[in-house]
Every structure is written in C-alpha cells, then in structure tokens.
Image (cartoon, grey):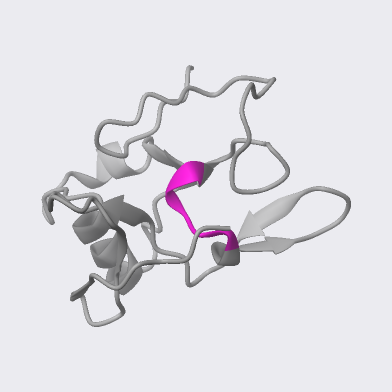
C-alpha cells in the first residue's frame, strides 16, 4: 500500500529515499491519526480542516507526513530515529494573504502567531 499524506494539498508519498530536507535529518516520516485520544484527534481534524465526523475507518488508514509538524514535536531516540511526541498537533497554512504557518492550540482555537522557522 502506498502511503500518501492526508494534509490538504500535500502530495508527499512514502519513499525509501528522500530528495529534499525535512523536519528531521532529511527523512520524511508518516504518522497515524491519534484515534485513541479523542481530544487530540479533534485538534488534528481542526488543523487539517477535516470534518469532525470523518469516519474512523478512514482515519485509521490515513497518515500525516512529518513536514506538517514543528521540529519541537519530535523526540530523538536511538541513532537518527525520531518519534512524534504524544502532544503533537499538525501545523497548517492559513488562507490569509500573509500565508503564515499556524497551529491549533489545546483549546481548539487557532493561534495565528508565527512559528519560528528552524
């Protein structure tokens, strides 16, 4: 099965070799929706501009690639491997003219303050 990113407009596919740098060591990773954490799942759906009632059967097979998370959302484990932190929520690009990268905060509100580029 080919993994594609569920992020709106993202065309990243799972490939064994990454051609451009990403959020961690140049490796693109794909992450499951937090289907067993209803509050965090709700935040992911808001950030991805998806319907709150998206069927669970779809959420269990969809993935979000590492390009849509902040570098702070990852923790290093052995070698160059990383794990997504349990508090991570994808970022999204606002539709405003400035196209700032933003994040949904823990209250479900959109935080329009810019996230520093690393």
Q: Residue furthest front?
A: 98
On screen, residue 35 above or below 72: above
For the point 23% across and 82% down, the residue is: 107
**Lateral position of residue 75 relative to residue 109, left or right:** right
Quarter holding residue 44: bottom left
**Lateral position of residue 21 relative to residue 58, left or right:** right
Q: How many marks?
A: 0
Quarter holding residue 101: bottom left
For the point 27% across and 37% down, the residue is: 58
Q: Residue furthest right?
A: 79
Residue 82 image offset from top left, x and y in percent: 71, 53
For the point 61% across and 28% down, the residue is: 20
Q: Out of 93 and 88, give the one closest to the viewer.
A: 93
Q: Out of 57 and 10, give the one closest to the viewer.
A: 10
Q: Out of 35 and 95, give the one closest to the viewer.
A: 95
Quarter holding residue 6: top left
Magenta residues span 67-71
The question of residue 70 being in magenta is answered with yes
Residue 115 image offset from top left, x and y in percent: 41, 66
């Amino acid at each position: 099965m080919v993994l594609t990113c569920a992020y709106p407009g993202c065309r990243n596919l799972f490939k064994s070799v990454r051609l451009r740098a990403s959020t961690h060591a140049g490796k693109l990773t794909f992450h499951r929706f937090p289907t067993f954490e209803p509050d965090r799942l709700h935040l992911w759906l808001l950030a991805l501009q998806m319907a709150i009632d998206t069927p669970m059967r779809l959420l269990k097979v969809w993935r979000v690639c590492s390009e849509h998370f902040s570098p702070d959302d990852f923790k290093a484990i052995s070698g160059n491997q990383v794990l997504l932190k349990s508090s991570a929520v994808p970022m999204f690009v606002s539709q405003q003219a400035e196209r700032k990268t933003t994040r949904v905060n823990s209250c479900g509100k959109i935080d329009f303050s810019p996230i520093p580029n690393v």
